[in-house]
Amino acid sequence: MNYTYLDSLATYGVGGAHPGGLQLTEQLLAREKMNRKTAILDVGCGTGQTSAYIFKQYKCNVTALDNNKVMIDKAKQRFRSSHLPINVVEGRTENLPFRNETFDIILSESVTAFTNIPVSLSEYKRVLKPNGVLLAIEMTAEPLPFTKKEKQFICDFYGVSQILTEKDWRNYFRKSGFRHVTVEKHMHHSVPQDVMYANDFMLSNQIQEEHYEILEQHQQIVSKYKDKLYFRVFRCTG
Ligand SMILES: C[S@@+](CC[C@H](N)C(=O)[O-])C[C@H]1O[C@@H](n2cnc3c(N)ncnc32)[C@H](O)[C@@H]1O
């Protein structure tokens, strides 16, 4: 395989490439205190679907960050064409180019699992205001055991070093200084929207066949491991 799962998402320009899609994002944000002064960082923004929604809905101060040039270009294109004044930054979650205590909310929608998790989390903590909120939608392994081979296959496919359980995530959040963590459990197969059901694509000019195969394989993994691979929404403060 020459390309990664993330390359394929970027090439297809999949908007809402997280479990639950924009529908879940809307629900999560509706529970937060949002006003025009709210400063929100969409880490791993992809093509910017969520950031665009946030600005249109709340008219607040939105920053969209990603480390993938293709994603960043597509996000910029989206914001430009809709005249949305969103600050777009090419950067890594492990080294956020922002001052301490800049944001009220950080949104990580299927992003942090792909990064160096403890480093990213301590960066989130650093750039969040003291009363800030981290909302993270992340893949989790269930207590139902994966065989060593299954685990390796999934890690290799997604390019992640591990698949964390809810408990592992909680430990990481706590170690990064988030004292209060609430969790919602979701099952992949119970949500209507995932990559293959997305309806927002910003296609690159050239799309190699392999990208389609990779996205199809993702869907097969989600359905094959539906009893072992769920996702959680973590709300972290403090
Ligand atoms: C599964 S996609 C989700 C994109 C977007 N949040 C969404 O829901 O549509 C993961 C995104 O995280 C970005 N990403 C992965 N590792 C990153 C890192 N270390 N720093 C910044 N962005 C990263 C990828 O480029 C990709 O856009």
Image (cartoon, rainbow, N blue to C red):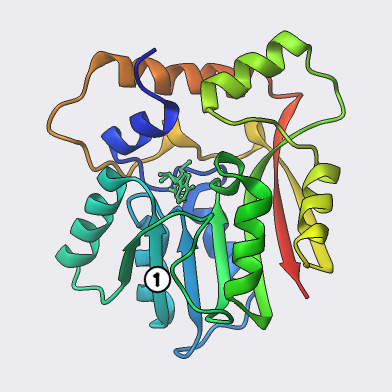
- Image quadrant for the N terminus? top left
Q: Is residue 11 left or right of residue 113?
A: left
Residue 185 % position (x, y) = 77, 46
Tell me the quarter of the picture where residue 58 sits: bottom left
Reading the image, the residue beneath label 1 is 63
As drawn, which residue projects farthest toward the top? 149
Instruction: In the rendered view, tell whether residue 27 sits above or below residue 218.
Output: below
| Vertical position of residue 103 compared to residue 22: above or below | below
Residue 69: percent from left, percent from top = 27, 47
Q: How many marks?
A: 1
Q: Position of residue 158 (x, y in %)?
A: 53, 27
Quadrant that contains the C terminus: bottom right
- Spot the residue most to the left: 205
Q: Quadrant of residue 204?
A: top left
Q: Amino acid at mark 1?
A: Thr
Q: Residues within 10 Å of mark 1 (few under 14, many from 20)?
A: many
The residue at 24%/50% (across/down) is 74
Residue 83 versus residue 4: which sits nearer the camera?
4
Secondary-structure class at tag 1: strand
> Which residue is painted at 78% across and 67% down in the image?
177
Residue at screen point 39% across, 53% down: 66
| 62 on left or right of 187 | left
Front-most of residues 137 and 201: 137
Quadrant of the image occupied by residue 228:
top right
**With 224 as the anchor, is 236 left or right in this view?**
right
Residue 147 image point, x, y percent: 78, 12
